[in-house]
Amino acid sequence: MKPEGSTVNVPEAAEILCVHQKTIWGLIAAGTLPAAKIGRAYVMLYRDVMAFAIQQIEHQTRQRMHGMPTGQNLPAPPPRRTRRKGRPGW
């Protein structure tokens, strides 16, 4: 566990939240996760990353307790199209 005032970079934040780095970039771009560009790298405060995790846990737990969808109960995507046998692939 990092000290309260320490910073984390994008790969570290992704590891803390158990998500892909692209997800972290999306959260930064949306302004959901506060970050600053220092030199060539983006950094976040460890406490902001943890606050985001806590917020999501509490929000999704409340939704489950009240029987509301959390975003994970989305309909299945349509089946993927496949090539027919015998046709050359392009």
Image: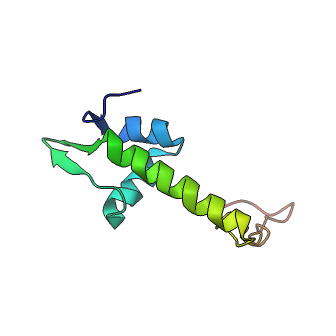
Nearest the camera: 33 or 80? 33
**Res 50 quadrant in image:** top left
**In the image, 16: left or right of 66?**
left
Nearest the camera: 2 or 17? 2
Q: Position of residue 40 (x, y in %)?
A: 17, 42
Nearest the camera: 55 or 87? 55
Q: Position of residue 90 (x, y in %)?
A: 65, 62
Residue at 33 percent across and 39 percent down: it is 46
The image's colour scheme reads rainbow
Q: Position of residue 30 (x, y in %)?
A: 35, 66
Vertical position of residue 40 compared to residue 32: above or below: above
Vertical position of residue 75 compared to residue 48: above or below: below
**In the image, 14: left or right of 43?**
right
Residue at 71 percent across and 64 percent down: it is 64
**Res 61 quadrant in image:** bottom right
Numbered marks: total: 0
Nearest the camera: 14 or 32? 32
Vertical position of residue 10 compared to residue 65: above or below: above
**In the image, 34: left or right of 11?**
left
Q: Position of residue 24 (x, y in %)?
A: 41, 51
Query: Residue furthest toward the right?
Result: 85
Q: Quadrant of the N terminus?
A: top left
Query: Residue furthest toward the left?
Result: 39
